[in-house]
Image: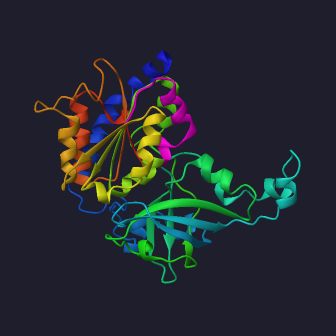
């Protein structure tokens, strides 16, 4: 670990300069955090929402199995999706310890889902696209898809926001296309090697900060078996969840089970997402000791906030010596 820290030190200066440039860009953006706007004048608006060209994506027919309420007011919806994933290996996969040759030659769609915070791009018949994070855990998704010719995953969407495809209003049986699973999950914007898994290895405190549909990928983190075991072994795992009202909050029924697993759940009520600043920082801009222990080096996971709020949070964290290599995102 000490050797890794020394190797990382040489990259910090360049990383922080890049961080300041990106944060200024985030602060000036008005786009949704789930579909960040990228400067690419030669690309269409549809591609700008996904950040990838069509040639980079593999499209698969996806069916809505369930559309159930995730919040008391029904605004946040959990969609259970069935992604076609028949690669002709049922006999070799279900019986015997050795997978069939077909499985080795044709990996499944679900095989790319390995880390909380990964996402997919969905599109309708008109070619309109939207990016959504997976709210299932990798273990749960692999388990439920093991003996099926389809992969089952969940996403969290906001019916009131609507989005490009109106996913929150889709009924069971409706179909669209999904890309392959993309991204590496929660990680630093500036150092690829700095991510959630490394923080678990190094024994860092984990502070999860979410708002709106950002609680979807955070649920994937909190329910992930390695994080549950991590919290159960006495490590600090804190979830700070901004919500406008308790009725609009998602997964409230899971709060108690998360607390029993050792996760500290702190609801933060307020109409504006910026109230999260007062929850984490005192009037002097210092991180509250009730959030982070003195002399600790926590990792922050941030999801679901508007660009300006995210940028300000990052600047305030940097003033507390928590720089980009210890702040992880899945939205950008």
* Residue 156 place in picture, x, y as percent: 44, 61
293 over 74 or under it: above or below: above
At x 30%, y 59%, the residue is 247
- Relative side of 309 to 326, left or right: left
Taking the view exactly as shown, the residue that stands out farthest to the bottom is 126
121 over 225 or under it: above or below: below
At x 20%, y 56%, the residue is 28
- Relative side of 241 to 196, left or right: left
Q: Please tell me whether residue 328 belongs to the stretch shown in magenta.
A: no
Q: Quadrant of residue 55?
A: bottom right
56 over 185 or under it: above or below: below
* Residue 253 place in picture, x, y as percent: 43, 50
Q: Please tell me whether residue 233 belongs to the stretch shown in magenta.
A: yes
Work out whether residue 332 can be spotted: no
- Relative side of 181 to 19, left or right: right
Q: Quick one: 190 or 75, which is closer to the camera?
A: 75
Q: Quadrant of residue 80?
A: bottom right
* Residue 264 place in picture, x, y as percent: 37, 34
Q: Quick one: 221 or 27, which is closer to the camera?
A: 221
Q: Quick one: 26 or 253, which is closer to the camera?
A: 253
For the magenta stretch, what is the residue range? Answer: 220-238
At x 66%, y 60%, the residue is 109
* Residue 298 place in picture, x, y as percent: 36, 28
At x 62%, y 67%, the residue is 82
Work out whether residue 155 can be spotted: yes
């Amino acid at each position: 670990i000490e050797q890794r820290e020394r190797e990382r030190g040489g990259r910090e200066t360049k990383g922080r300069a890049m961080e300041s440039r990106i944060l200024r860009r985030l602060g000036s953006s008005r786009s949704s955090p789930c579909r960040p706007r990228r400067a690419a004048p030669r690309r269409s608006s549809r591609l700008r929402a996904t950040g990838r060209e069509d040639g980079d994506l593999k499209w698969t027919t996806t069916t809505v199995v369930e559309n159930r309420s995730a919040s008391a007011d029904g605004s946040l919806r959990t969609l259970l999706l069935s992604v076609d994933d028949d690669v002709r290996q049922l006999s070799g996969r279900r019986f015997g310890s050795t997978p069939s040759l077909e499985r080795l030659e044709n990996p499944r769609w679900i095989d790319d889902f390995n880390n909380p915070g990964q996402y997919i791009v969905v599109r309708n018949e008109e070619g309109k696209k939207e990016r959504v994070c997976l709210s299932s855990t990798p273990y749960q998704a692999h388990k439920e898809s093991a003996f099926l010719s389809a992969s089952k995953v969940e996403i969290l969407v906001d019916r009131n926001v609507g989005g490009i495809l109106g996913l929150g209003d889709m009924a069971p049986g409706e179909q669209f296309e999904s890309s392959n699973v993309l991204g590496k999950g929660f990680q630093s914007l500036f150092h690829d090697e700095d991510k959630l898994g490394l923080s678990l290895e190094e024994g860092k405190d984990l502070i999860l900060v979410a708002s709106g549909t950002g609680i979807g990928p955070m649920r994937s983190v909190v329910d992930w078996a390695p994080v549950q075991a991590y919290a159960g072994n006495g490590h600090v795992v804190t979830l700070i969840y901004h919500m406008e009202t308790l009725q609009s909050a998602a997964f409230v029924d899971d709060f108690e089970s998360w607390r029993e697993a050792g996760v500290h759940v702190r609801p933060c009520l307020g109409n504006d997402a910026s109230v999260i600043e007062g929850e984490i920082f005192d009037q002097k801009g210092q991180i509250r000791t009730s959030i982070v222990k003195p002399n600790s080096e926590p990792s922050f996971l941030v999801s679901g906030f508007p660009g300006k709020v995210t940028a300000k949070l990052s600047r305030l964290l940097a003033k507390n010596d928590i720089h980009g290599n210890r702040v992880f995102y899945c939205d950008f």
